[in-house]
Amino acid sequence: MDVNLFDFDLARELIAERPVVPRDSARMLHVTASGSEDSWVRDLPGFLRPGDILVSNDTRVIPARLFGRKGEGGVELTLHERVGLDSWKAFARPAKKLRPGDVVRFAPDFRAEIAEKGEAGEVTLRFDRSGDELMLALEDYGTLPLPPYIRKGCADERDKGDYQTLFAREKGAVAAPTAGLHFTPDLLAAIDGAGILRTTVTLHVGAGTFLPVKVNDTQDHRMHSERGVVSQETADLINRAKADGGRVVAVGTTSLRLLESATGEDGCLRPFDGATDIFITPGYRFKLVDVLMTNFHLPKSTLFMLVSAFAGLERMQAAYAHAMASGYRFYSYGDSCLLERENA
């Protein structure tokens, strides 16, 4: 498909710089086949049914942005995909002077070697420690990798809490699963009280989620890969809820992508532990997810393509036009929309 079909003009002032407080006071646009309805995130339980199952992403964002030195020159590295206990792929700035074998020092006792050099500023780093020791070093020397459209990616102390969801448990993401940022303890209590089931999956969101689509046709875009896990227990719970007539409600495009990756053509969700590079565009046949809660996405992004596949391109174009005219807040810290699947 022509990538320009997914383009729109967004005013800079609609990009949210901070989340609202409390989180569930964010606005939520409910989009159905009959149109759209303005509401609030705290109203979510009223749009769901007893027996529905809400599936959230429990990944936790790590301090994945590192500033180091190679010789006398400074280097900025943003980790985006773990490839081993001591190795990560990263985007480097500047990358042109880096070569395999070069050493980047982040502290007197913390360094990494350039193991490989890829395309578009990507390198593979091999650190001088691994596993939990590496995670501890990142906590000491790394910073939170905010998206570039929020304060030019410069995180502060407040973001350490703002950019993690209530579900965050499994360390490994370099971007937050932002639909989950809207949840509060009060909202979860209301969801539980309404007879709605809850569970989590893990998809470690990569920095590739921020990369623009640079091709003219969606068929030519190479999707980034992200690692995910669906346990046997979670698969059984979701399959049972679906068999009993409940709807599968994905909190975020990350949860949806993993669930669809792990579901067979028979509509049965299976345990999953591996990488997915699923790229969902209009024409995709959804196998499991019935309802999607998500934020408002960038023009010409893979995420706007996904929601257009889920709810219909014309419906989403109309919904986004309404959201912009009504002052909804966009992107990671912005407002939410609740989408009913087209032809569900």
Image: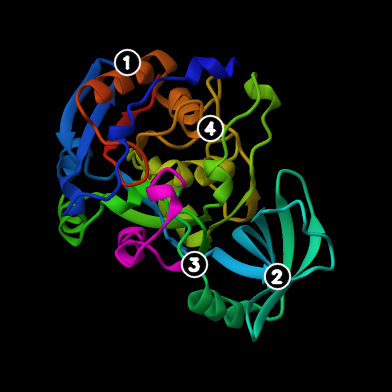
**Residue 253 image offset from top left, x and y in percent:** 45, 41
Badge nearest the viewer, 2 or 1: 2
Give the amino acid at mark 2. Answer: Glu
**Residue 224 image offset from top left, x and y in percent:** 64, 43
- Is the residue under label 1 in contact with that under label 2 (CB below 8 Å)? no
The part of the chain drawn in magenta is 148-171
Residue 318, numbered circle: 1
At 45% from the left and 48% from the top, the residue drawn is: 147
Give the Cα distance between marks 4 and 3. Answer: 24 Å
Identify the image quadrant of the C terminus: top left
Relative height, residue 260 to residue 90 (above, below): above
Q: Earlier in the sequence, mark 1 or mark 3?
A: 3
- Residue identifier under label 2: 72
Residue in front for this viewpoint, 199 or 36: 36
Residue in front for this viewpoint, 91 or 304: 91
Residue 115 placement, left or right of 4: right
Give the Cα distance between marks 1 and 3. Answer: 37 Å
Give the Cα distance between marks 2 and 4. Answer: 38 Å
Give the amino acid at mark 1. Answer: Ala
Tell me if mark 2 has few (under 14), some (14-19) or many (20+) residues whose alpha carbon lies within 10 angstroms of its own: few
- Residue identifier under label 4: 302
Q: Earlier in the sequence, mark 1 or mark 4?
A: 4
Q: Earlier in the sequence, mark 4 or mark 3?
A: 3
